[in-house]
Image (cartoon, rainbow, N blue to C red):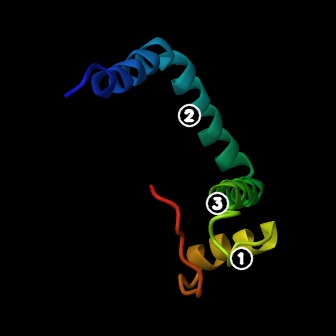
Amino acid sequence: MSASDVRTPLLWALGLELFRDDLADLREGFRTRAQDEPMETTLQTVLVAASLFYAAEHGQNPKIDSFAAALEYITTSLSVGSINVYPVTEA
């Protein structure tokens, strides 16, 4: 195993340790927000997921040619789960 292979996980672990309290506050804020405004939280989650999917797949997946196509993929995946679009980027 090379030094660069070890360095990345160590940096992640260090970052998580340094920002543990901040992450806990952020998590609690999300929890409170979801309880207070469940529909708004759901809508925001779907829009963020569609944005991330569009950013990852646009230009590499010919079926994701617009934000609307990415939004359709995300909403269909969350409901019936059957659509003729598949991610092509590597995880």
Residue name at image x 45 percent, y 55 percent: 91
Asked where in the image residue 26 lies, by quadrant, the reply is top right
Looking at the image, is mark 3 or mark 1 earlier in the sequence? 3
Q: What distance separates the C-alpha of mark 3 from that of mark 1?
A: 11 Å
Asked where in the image residue 63 lies, by quadrant, the reply is bottom right
Amino acid at pointer 1: Glu
Give the crowd class for mark 3: few <14, some 14-19, many >=20 residues within 10 Å.
many
Would you place residue 27 above or below residue 10 in this image?
A: below
| Direction from residue 52 to residue 4 in the image, left or right | left
Give the crowd class for mark 1: few <14, some 14-19, many >=20 residues within 10 Å.
some
| Direction from residue 88 to residue 74 in the image, left or right | right
Q: Which residue is mark 1?
A: 72
Looking at the image, is mark 3 or mark 2 earlier in the sequence? 2
| Direction from residue 44 to residue 16 in the image, left or right | left
Q: Secondary structure at mark 1?
A: helix
Q: Which residue is mark 2?
A: 27
Q: Position of residue 32 (x, y in %)?
A: 65, 39
Q: Which residue is mark 3?
A: 53
Residue name at image x 58 percent, y 73 percent: 78
Q: What distance separates the C-alpha of mark 3 from that of mark 2?
A: 23 Å
Looking at the image, which is closer to me, 13 or 40? 13
